[in-house]
Image (spheres, rainbow, N blue to C red):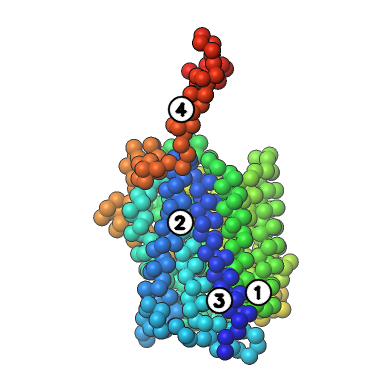
Amino acid sequence: MIDTGNTTWLLVSAALVMLMTPGLAFFYGGMSRAKSVLNMMLMSFASIAIVSVLWVAIGHSLTYAEGPGALNHFIGGFDYVGLSSLIGEIEPSDGEGGAGYPLLVDAGFQMMFAIITVALISGAIADRAKFGAWLIFVPVWATLVYFPVAHWVWGGGWFELINIGGAGVVDFAGGTAVHINAGAAALALTFVLGRRKGFGVESMRPHNLPFVLLGAALLWFGWFGFNAGSAYAADGTAALALVNTQVATAAAIIAWIIVEKLRYGKASALGFASGAIAGLVAITPAAADVTPLGAIAVGAVSGAVCAYAISWKFKFKFDDALDVVGIHMVGGIIGSLMIGLVAAEITSGSSGLFDGGGVSLLIVQLIAVAATIVYSFIATWIIAKIIDLIMGFRIPEEVETNGLDHELHAETAYAFDELDELEAEAVSSSTPPGEETASSQAKA
């Protein structure tokens, strides 16, 4: 029978995770330059459209269906293609308050994870990617990279075969499959597309910090569905994940602001927003495997380290425009590895080094992290390079200079010309002949 409580929670969680991608669009859009904000936001919305259809067609099946023979360790099969076979099917109750939900709810919930993973990558290549090339990249990358890696983690793939001293890979809600995967892919794309014109020389500061804060707030809100929803039940595990998500994020903000204050002498709105995302990323794989105090430690380490990591792009000369590598890959690595240190047996049964579990869990986490980085980086580089050779991935220099919104979409986010004309008309109508206001003199 259907457990209405668990089903309701999964439905709500799916909606919360769906909200995260529009939130990401605002977060990335605000961090972009004014002349390319629409393009940046559309890359996220395009991911929603393309991945949703692709997930129904083949994505859920390749992630969760049993694959053929030994290939099942790498990728799923085709039993769930089109999702028709899931209609009316129910995950049986485990007798302890878990499961009892329609399988289509699970498919819908995991669809939202696939969507935002692809959208996360776009921030690294802001201001310089052809929109058409991005539309090709999205389904190819999702099929060849996200679906296999998600299968490794959650669908019965080879991660489940790793066992050292009784310890297996722990990734509660997507530290490897989502954040490290997207971050490694973002790094690969920066090498294929190269640096923006003026990188390291011109100011490329966020054009709309209120957008950034709004996006961070929507992401934070949606992340409760991302993490607590991954309990797949309205139970104590969901409660622990919710609390851990909140306190890890708060600790990361505090740590980020301290580092920012020490380095630059001031705390910034962008620092608050970036610190929040760093904490959310890091606690994702560990949300149900650490105590609230452990979650605070995870968040604090992530906030401090990621605050430094975002500047590595200038040292190593790769143009990660909106810090996908510095926050998502680095934050995902920290969260995944800290499980091996602070996981507590009282939560899920896994014990990290500080809980008397030795180094076994840390080693298996390191294997999962390394495998995800290597596969995602290499596969993404190959995909992007082929697209670049066939149709070109990077826009021409003049398009980059003029702005992607006008050149690629025939739109602008802000009607600057119309505002200038209205201001000029207002000045003209209110100024007596022969006199000029300070404003009109300044414009002249």
Distance from the alpha carbon under mark 2 to that under mark 4: 33 Å
In what element is the residue under mark 1? Answer: helix
Distance from the alpha carbon under mark 3 to that under mark 4: 61 Å
Residue 44, which numbered label? 2
Mark toward the viewer: 4 or 1: 4
Q: Residues within 10 Å of mark 1 (few under 14, many from 20)?
A: many
Vertical arrangement, residue 378 with respect to residue 392, above or below? below
Earlier residue among tags 1 and 3: 3
Write down the residue under mark 3. 169
Residue 238, which numbered label? 1
Q: At label 1, which amino acid type do we have?
A: Ala
Which residue is painted at 49% across and 45% down in the image? 32
Which residue is painted at 59% across and 54% down in the image? 216
Which residue is painted at 47% across and 70% down in the image? 111
Mark toward the viewer: 3 or 4: 4
Write down the residue under mark 4. 421
Q: At label 3, which amino acid type do we have?
A: Val
Earlier residue among tags 2 and 4: 2
Earlier residue among tags 4 and 1: 1
| Residue 319 visible at all | no
| Residue 122 visible at all | yes
Residue 219 in the image: state x and y as whole percent.
Answer: 58, 58
Residue 359 in the image: state x and y as whole percent.
Answer: 63, 74
Q: Quadrant of the N terminus?
A: bottom right
Which residue is painted at 65% across and 40% down in the image? 264
